[in-house]
């Protein structure tokens, strides 16, 4: 239930950002990151963990994660403001597929044929989703088409975000979740300010309210997601991430008149199925490793 609530709040955040219009990505990143800090601080203060939340011996690792995460976030927000909501959300499902690929390339993780097959099938789904825009690349005016640029940005965002997840995997070995979340929000806020001279726009009262709400939603969703993973195994919680596809279709239609295309629906189902298989397969491998450790004779 907590994970579903987290997904719903994240979709609410994306809805606020899209409703604010085509604003500069850096400006959106600042509001999303800075105002996310407030609900997180309140939560940590309530849990009496605020005093040590920023304490770390790996500041450079946090900054590196922040730089990569901000790039992914900025591209994702660019895509969100230029694509129909269902398509923008569904293209982000390429991220867990790419995590598998990059885990093999950069971390040397052994990936068996089952997961490679799931990745290949999932990427076919991504291709189906983005095919209408990709076919425009044969046109000389393609790079002037906002939806084409949105698809390109979404795919790059998924790839960069997958690398950010690898950095987080490294951080969680020594750092607390609260430390990782706060360092990222702070780093992203500061980095986003560097984009201030490059076209930030004067905001209406409505736009300001929407972006502030997006930030609060982002922070609240992070808290709910963390709580969900604390109370249940990741393999149980993770599949509920895909409920965002349903919410995206519904909210996109009623809020913006976005109608999910056949490509988005068919490709989305394929990507979701591939992602679910990867989650299931990783759970099975985890159970195998546990049984192997229990069966191994004691040392010494």
Image (cartoon, rainbow, N blue to C red):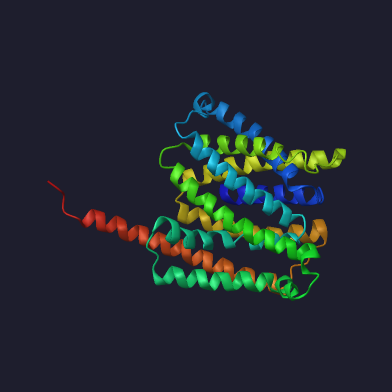
At which x and y percent is residue 214? 72, 43
* Residue positioned 79% across, 72% down in the render: 140
At which x and y percent is residue 62? 52, 38
At which x and y percent is residue 109? 39, 59
* Residue 1 in view here: no
* Residue 274 in view here: yes
The residue lying furthest to the right in this view is: 204
| Quadrant of residue 200 within the rendered picture | top right
| Quadrant of residue 57 within the rendered picture | top left
**Position of 5 compared to 213: left or right?**
left
Location of residue 5 with respect to 47 vertically, above or below: below
* Depth check, front residue: 231 or 287: 287
| Quadrant of residue 207 within the rendered picture | top right
* Depth check, front residue: 186 or 43: 186
Q: How many marks?
A: 0
* Residue positioned 54% across, 43% down in the render: 65
At which x and y percent is residue 87? 70, 64
* Residue positioned 45% across, 37% down in the render: 175
**Position of 197 compared to 40: left or right?**
right
The residue lying furthest to the top in this view is: 51
């Amino acid at each position: 239930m907590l994970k579903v609530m987290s997904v719903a709040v994240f979709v609410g955040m994306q809805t606020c950002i899209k409703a604010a219009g085509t604003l500069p990505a850096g400006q959106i990143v600042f509001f999303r990151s800075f105002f996310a800090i407030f609900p997180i601080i309140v939560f940590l203060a309530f849990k009496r963990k605020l005093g040590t939340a920023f304490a770390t011996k790996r500041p450079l690792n946090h900054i590196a994660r922040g730089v990569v995460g901000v790039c992914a976030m900025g591209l994702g927000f660019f895509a969100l403001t230029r694509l129909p909501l269902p398509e923008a959300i569904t293209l982000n499902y390429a991220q867990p597929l790419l995590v598998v690929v990059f885990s093999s390339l950069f971390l040397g993780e052994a990936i068996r044929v089952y997961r490679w097959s799931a990745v290949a099938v999932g990427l076919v789904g991504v291709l189906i989703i983005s095919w209408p825009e990709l076919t425009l690349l044969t046109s000389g005016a393609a790079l002037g088409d906002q939806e084409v640029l949105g698809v390109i940005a979404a795919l790059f965002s998924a790839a960069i975000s997958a690398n950010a997840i690898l950095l987080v995997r490294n951080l969680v070995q020594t750092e607390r979740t609260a430390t990782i979340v706060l360092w990222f929000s702070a780093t992203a806020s500061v980095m986003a300010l560097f984009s201030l001279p490059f076209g930030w726009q004067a905001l209406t009262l409505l736009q300001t309210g929407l972006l502030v709400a997006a930030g609060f939603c982002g922070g609240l969703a992070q808290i709910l997601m963390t709580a969900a993973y604390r109370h249940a195994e990741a393999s149980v919680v993770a599949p509920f991430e895909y409920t965002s596809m349903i919410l995206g279709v519904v909210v996109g239609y009623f809020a913006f008149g976005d109608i999910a295309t056949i490509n988005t629906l068919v490709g989305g189902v394929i990507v979701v199925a591939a992602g679910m298989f990867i989650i299931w397969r990783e759970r099975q491998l985890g159970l195998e490793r546990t049984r192997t450790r229990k069966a191994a004779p004691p040392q010494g």
